[in-house]
Image (cartoon, rainbow, N blue to C red):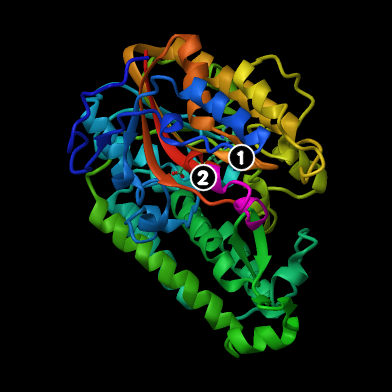
């Protein structure tokens, strides 16, 4: 793998990039006596994985690989999909690689890659296992006419006229009473029923996405870190304290809870309406979006792909279904626990809940060497070695299928973060590059976009290895 020198400054549109002259592994001195054996062994593995790796210092991408900007971006702001990246990032790659053919995102989430493809008037395909992601991506990528906008606005007017019902609404979500103030819960359920009765399907879907989007704001929980946290649980210098639920709700929610929730929904819908009005004519090509596993994408469409751009779940045990648990249950995407468990099982093997009984077929020598360094006493779950192996087994399956369906000269861009367990770093970027190269791809570049932090327990232990905790974009070419 020759380091690519072609990406000089400003190569990628207005993003300033520079070539890293030495592999990262060689820039870290091995201080004798200050590194443990496990660390020295890791350095050796990294050195071999990073030999001639075409690293690019791409700090200017750091704001593009996460959702922060998207909270303000028209259309993307319809649903706060915090695991998403920016359309600007995708657009930059599409333009610089001069893509004119089909684009694919095997983990389409809220549909950012598809949105960018549409902006460039290119055909695209997206897949996701999470039904919420599929709905959001479809609604954000739908083509709306003047009459659709008229219909949306007239339904918003009807919503304004709704008053509080006396009926008591039920939900099969067993945590609902903990997660919501009771009046807020009743309002959400009343509004959901109202939405289900909207006849025009496009309008109904927009309303439903808006309803899903406001849930977190009006609930007692927030999506944070690797799951959901109760807002009334506060961190203090002496540890966590729980503020009584009733006391906390009195402090943060207004007296008139019905109008509080209804107004939030109306405001959100009005913002969507403005975006639709401003977006007319910009979506000639409508993406095809499927619900399913990317590991079987070849069964869903057989068109050749010129460019695949995606961000998979990271190998860090983040559970996408856990983070969307409240929306999935309250939105009736799941009705019984078994359904929820099965849904989790369809996900990429990136967390302990996604482990199905699939065998691990692919073996990577570097990965095995790293897994052998895990300290089982320090692992917070005994199944972590299976997660890590399953993750790269799935990665191998996906890359293999992508290789088959990519046009000659076509590209694949992967936004991925490295992770760590018991003081051992899993450098997903270079491991993915290694797997891809063995399949037949050329590894064009590894753009290092930013450095990541780890849990406070591992921070000190990983101090000397911290350069390897990074988020990168691996660019492959067939
Ligand atoms: C990092 S997010 C992608 C975010 C997306 N790029 C965006 O901008 O919204 C990863 C996505 O992978 C999805 N996912 C997990 N396992 C999957 C699988 N086996 N097949 C397809 N999608 C999967 C998750 O539901 C999640 O939406």
Label located before the other in sequence (1 or 2): 1
Q: Quadrant of the C terminus?
A: top left
- Counting from the top left corner in percent of width and height, residue 113 is at 38, 37
Looking at the rendering, the stretch of residues picked out in magenta corresponds to: 455-464
Q: Is 237 rendered above or below residue 15?
A: below
Label 2 CB-ligand 1 distance < 8 A: no
Task: Give me the residue at 22% from left, 42% from top.
Answer: 16
* 202, 440: nearer the viewer: 440
Secondary element type, mark 2: helix
- Counting from the top left corner in percent of width and height, residue 3 is at 31, 20
Q: Is 151 rendered above or below residue 401?
A: below
Instruction: Determine if the magenta segment contains residue 226.
Output: no
**Residue 464 sits in quarter:** top right
Quadrant holding ligand 1?
Answer: top right
Q: Which mark is residue 33?
A: 1
**Most frequent secondary structure within the magenta stretch:** helix
Q: Which mark is residue 305?
A: none
- Counting from the top left corner in percent of width and height, residue 166 is at 70, 80
Q: Which mark is residue 466?
A: 2
Decide if residue 284 is in sight here: no
Q: Residues within 10 Å of mark 1 (few under 14, many from 20)?
A: few
Q: Is 376 rendered above or below residue 304?
A: below
């Amino acid at each position: 793998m020759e380091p690519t020198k072609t990406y000089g400054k400003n190569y990628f549109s207005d993003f300033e990039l520079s070539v890293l002259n030495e592999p990262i592994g060689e820039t870290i001195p091995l201080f004798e006596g200050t590194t443990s054996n496990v660390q020295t062994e890791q350095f050796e593995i990294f050195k071999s994985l990073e030999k001639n790796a075409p690293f690019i210092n791409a700090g200017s991408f750091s704001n593009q690989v996460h959702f922060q900007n998207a909270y303000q971006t028209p259309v993307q702001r319809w649903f706060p999909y915090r695991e998403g990246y920016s359309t600007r990032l995708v657009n930059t790659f599409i333009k610089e690689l001069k893509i004119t053919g089909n684009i694919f995102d095997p983990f389409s989430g809220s549909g950012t890659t598809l949105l960018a493809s549409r902006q460039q008037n290119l055909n695209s395909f997206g897949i996701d296992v999470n039904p919420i992601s599929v709905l959001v991506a479809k609604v954000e990528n739908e083509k709306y006419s003047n009459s659709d906008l008229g219909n949306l606005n007239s339904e918003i007017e009807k919503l304004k006229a709704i008053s509080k019902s006396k009926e008591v609404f039920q939900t099969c979500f067993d945590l609902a009473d903990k997660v919501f103030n009771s009046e807020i819960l009743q309002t959400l359920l009343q509004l959901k029923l109202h939405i289900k009765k909207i006849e025009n399907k496009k309008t109904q879907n927009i309303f439903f996405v808006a309803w899903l989007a406001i849930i977190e704001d009006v609930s007692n929980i927030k999506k944070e870190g690797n799951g959901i946290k109760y807002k009334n649980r506060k961190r203090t210098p002496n540890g966590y304290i729980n503020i009584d639920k009733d006391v906390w709700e009195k402090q943060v929610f207004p007296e008139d809870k019905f109008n509080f929730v209804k107004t939030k929904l109306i405001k959100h819908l009005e913002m969507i309406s403005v975006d639709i009005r401003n977006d007319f004519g910009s979506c000639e090509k409508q993406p095809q979006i499927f619900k399913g596993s990317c590991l079987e994408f070849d069964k869903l469409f057989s068109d050749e792909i010129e460019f695949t751009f995606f961000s998979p779940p990271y190998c860090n045990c983040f559970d996408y279904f856990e983070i969307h648990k409240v929306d999935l249950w309250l939105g009736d995407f799941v009705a019984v626990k078994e359904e929820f468990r099965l849904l989790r099982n369809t996900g990429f093997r990136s967390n302990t809940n996604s482990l199905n009984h699939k065998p691990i077929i692919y073996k990577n020598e570097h990965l095995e060497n790293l897994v052998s360094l895990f300290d089982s006493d320090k692992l917070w779950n005994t199944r972590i070695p299976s997660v890590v192996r399953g993750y790269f087994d799935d990665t191998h399956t996906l890359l293999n299928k992508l290789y088959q369906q990519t046009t000659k000269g076509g590209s694949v861009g992967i936004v991925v973060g490295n992770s760590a367990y018991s003081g051992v770093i899993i450098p997903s970027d270079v491991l993915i590059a290694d797997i891809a190269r063995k399949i037949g791809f050329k590894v064009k570049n590894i753009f290092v976009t930013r450095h990541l932090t780890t849990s406070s327990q591992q921070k000190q232990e990983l101090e000397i290895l911290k350069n390897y905790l990074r988020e990168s974009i691996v660019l492959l070419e067939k």
